[in-house]
Amino acid sequence: MQVNSPNFKAKAEAALTDPQLREALGKTRIMFVNKRAELAAALPEFEHLRDEARDRKNHILAHLDHYLERFDEAVTRAGGKVHWCADAAEARRVILDICRRVEAKSITKGKSMVSEEIGLNEALEAEGYRVLETDLGEYIIQLAHEPPSHIIAPAAHKTQEQVADLFHAAHGGPRKTTVAELVTEARLVLRDEYFRADVGITGGNFLVAETGSTVIVTNEGNGDLTQTLARVHIVTSGIERIVPTLEDVSLFLRILARSATGQETETYTTFSTGPRRPGDPDGPEEFHVVLVDNGRSGMLGGPFQDMLRCIRCGACMNHCPVYGAVGGHAYGWVYPGPMGAVLTPLFVGLDATRDLPNACTLNGRCQSVCPVRIPLPELLRELRHQQHQQGLRPPAERRALATWRFVAERPRLYQFANRVAARALKGLGGDAGRLRSLPFAEGWTAFRDLPAPEGLTFLELWQARHPGKR
């Protein structure tokens, strides 16, 4: 997938003036936020589970090599094969080699963010393979020739009317208008494709070291059909998705659906262990797991290791005011929202993504709802610090910060400048007490007035209300 993160500001400005996008995002965001709050409150031990999940993830990351090796051994015992891929190019090559060897023609895919990350669809289609997304949201954006805008609701940016137009253009026949009609139409179109597919590709929400099983969670059942009806099943997953035991899976499942879609549990939770065995009524003839590093091992032991705890629930973006205003496409790559503002710079480089860590108000809502308690604001601040250290911020911004630092390091000068600014802003506010425009803050005052201060600094106000205290 092409990296368009350098165009964040232009895409964000366009998104802010798109009424259909605002309508679609508003409905999805409210639904996810309200349902999560309701389901979390209904589970008394929810906060304890978050602590336990965080600690369990930290243990896994501290022993990641051990559990990955155990997983490889277990997959092999079950008759499958694990492919270790250092980067996206190697992962694409491995999957293409499998498809060529089995003489595949048609490929079905369940939702997989790692496949988006490695640009798999583009690589397969360039080799002449027919690739069909089977997740309803992914199918919608495939018809629209767009990337996902959300990691659990890929078509969250589409209104019902837009989906109806896409289906009518792609399928012909009478234009359907209701949700039930659109879902039925998609089901009928996709049904035959499962039986026709030579290769089925899915993601892996969890990889179980003790059994060699891969786990996917879905609400549509498309993943089950994708991985059981094709001759070959390929799982694409990041190395951090490993868990030691089946009991660990149950822990994470209790917080995943509640955090993601506000459900007690997913409709389908499917475990796959190796290819079809003698006597099995269905299943693939071959089972492959493509483990993708692609920069993850470089995060171990460093300031961003906490990000590897992410279970891809999407709660951070559901609660993010910036994502809620501009949507996922503005972020310009696979992972949007707060988690994307951290992951994208780490995966593709700070220079190409300089606006993403700064597209955040640091309000902390993302951290407050993260099921594994990732300190996202701290990680974003660290990325901003690294940008400044590497000279990646605009010269005017660096000069402004240098000036502020010079003044802040001199208390008397700082207090004098504060007094001058407070009194000047009070005068500019006039009788209305509001500033309609302000130099160096045009981006703020273009959309809202700024309340004028009282004409006194914070320290002066504090001393007036608390005489003798400092």
Image: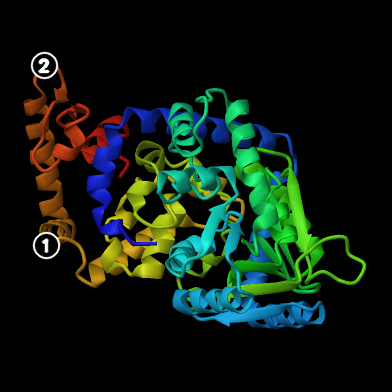
Q: Amino acid at mark 2?
A: Asp
Q: CA distance from mark 1 to mark 2?
A: 37 Å
Residue at figure coordinates x 62%, y 77% from the top left: 62
Residue at far right of view: 279
Q: Is residue 52 left or right of residue 392?
A: right
Q: Amino acid at mark 1?
A: Pro
Residue that mark 1 sits on: 395
Residue that mark 2 sits on: 431
Residue at figure coordinates x 68%, y 58% from the top left: 53
Q: How many labels were placed on the picture?
A: 2
Residue at figure coordinates x 58%, y 65% from the top left: 105
Mark 1: few/some/many CA within 10 Å (<14, 14-19, 20+): few
Residue at far front of view: 173
> The C terminus lies in which quarter of the figure?
top left
**In the depicted structure, whether residue 468 falls above or below residue 408:** above
State the SS at label 1. Answer: helix
Residue at figure coordinates x 36%, y 65% from the top left: 345
Q: Quadrant of residue 380?
A: bottom left
Residue 52 appearing in the image: no
